Amino acid sequence: MDFGIVLLLAFFGWLAWLMLKSKSSDEQFHCMDCGVDSQPTIRAKGSIWIEVVLWICFIVPGLIYSIWRLSSKRNICPSCDGANLIPYNSPAAVKHRKELSS
């Protein structure tokens, strides 16, 4: 097998591993939008379907789009999909929980 093909397959395997690996954390967060205390969900911007189409049609745009999606991962609230999360024990979270309970 040609070394270039092996290198290309290794690269695609590495990209797939990066996209599928989970960054699981036991850290709790407080959502300032809805007030839920939970573990965040990790979500990337963009669409997996656009990514697949770009990879099927053209390698370079697919690669650029995949890198952008991998770099745009962020924590979001599992309840309201908001991105306004802060650590559970932070002073702002404690204050917000007190405001919600009163």
Image: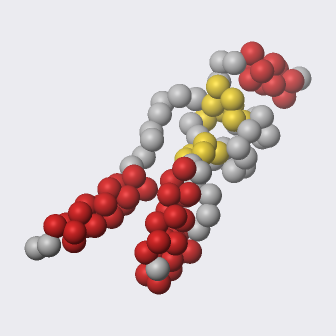
| Residue 37 sits above or below residue 71 on the image | above
Q: Is residue 63 left or right of residue 14?
A: right
- Location of residue 4 by image quarter: bottom left
Q: Residue furthest top?
A: 91
Q: Residue furthest left?
A: 1
x and y percentages locating residue 43 in the rendered image? 57, 52
- Location of residue 45 by image quarter: bottom right
* Depth order, front residue of 23/63: 63
Color scheme of the displayed model: secondary structure
x and y percentages locating residue 55 in the rendered image? 45, 75
Residue at left offset 51%, top offset 77%: 54
| Residue 22 sits above or below residue 4 on the image | above
Residue 101 appears in view: no
Q: Is residue 77 left or right of residue 61?
A: right
Residue at left offset 60%, top offset 45%: 74
| Residue 56 sits above or below residue 82 on the image | below
The C terminus: image quadrant: top right
Residue at left offset 74%, top offset 23%: 93
The N terminus: image quadrant: bottom left
Residue at left offset 66%, top offset 44%: 77
x and y percentages locating residue 8 in the rendered image? 28, 67
| Residue 41 sits above or below residue 4 on the image | above
